[in-house]
Image (cartoon, rainbow, N blue to C red):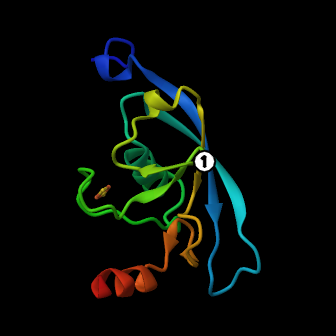
Amino acid sequence: MSADTNPKNEHTRMYRFEILRYDASRDDEPRFQAYQVAAQANMSVLEALLKIQDEQDPSLAFRYACRGAVCGSCAMAINGKLNLACRVQLKNLHTNRVILEPLPRFEILKDLVVDMDLFWEKYQRI
Ligand code: FES
């Protein structure tokens, strides 16, 4: 089957991901890094992140576990709104510019991974 007749390619388009990068062990300040990604519109933000990590940048760090909007580990700011990366489909962002930042008010460990220790301590007390 050629690429033109493959129905999976029907809704593929280019997205520009701008992802906050930071490594607490070596960086002074966070910075945004841009990635151009060919992705299907029904792909989730998490699937796009996995594609970026697999094809462009294995150093990109983010968390996920269930991939089914249950565990909450993929929570992040997606175009300024807190959401689960596995739940948000690219087509529902209504833009091809996707800005990803870690959860606010948490210490960044690396890229989109934040330190959740204090959160879990408080959660256990409750
Ligand atoms: S991976 Fe579990 S909620 Fe997204």
Give the left or right position of residue 51, taking residue 94 as reference.
left
Ligand 1's quadrant is bottom left
Q: Quadrant of residue 97?
A: top right
Label 1 belongs to which residue? 80
Residue at x 45%, y 34% (from the top left corner): 90
Front residue of 53/66: it is 66
103 above or below 87? Answer: below
What is the quadrant of the N terminus in the image? top left
46 above or below 114? Answer: above
Q: How many marks?
A: 1
Q: Residue placed farthest to the top in the image?
A: 5
Residue type at mark 1?
A: Gly
Image coords of residue 62 (percent x, y): 45, 65
Residue at x 47%, y 51% (from the top left corner): 55
Image coords of residue 15 (percent x, y): 57, 34
Q: Residue placed farthest to the right in the image?
A: 28
Q: Regarding mark 1 in the picture, which secondary structure is present there?
A: loop
Front residue of 6/82: it is 82
Give the left or right position of residue 76, taking residue 111 as reference.
left
Residue at x 58%, y 65% (from the top left corner): 104
Image coords of residue 71 (percent x, y): 26, 62
Give the left or right position of residue 55, taking residue 8 as reference.
right
28 above or below 51? Answer: below
Image coords of residue 122 (percent x, y): 38, 84
In the image, the residue with mark 1 has its CB under 8 Å from the nearest atom of ligand 1 = no
Mark 1, other Cα within 10 Å: few <14 / some 14–19 / many ≥20: few
Front residue of 65/33: it is 65
Front residue of 103/32: it is 103
What is the quadrant of the C terminus in the image? bottom left
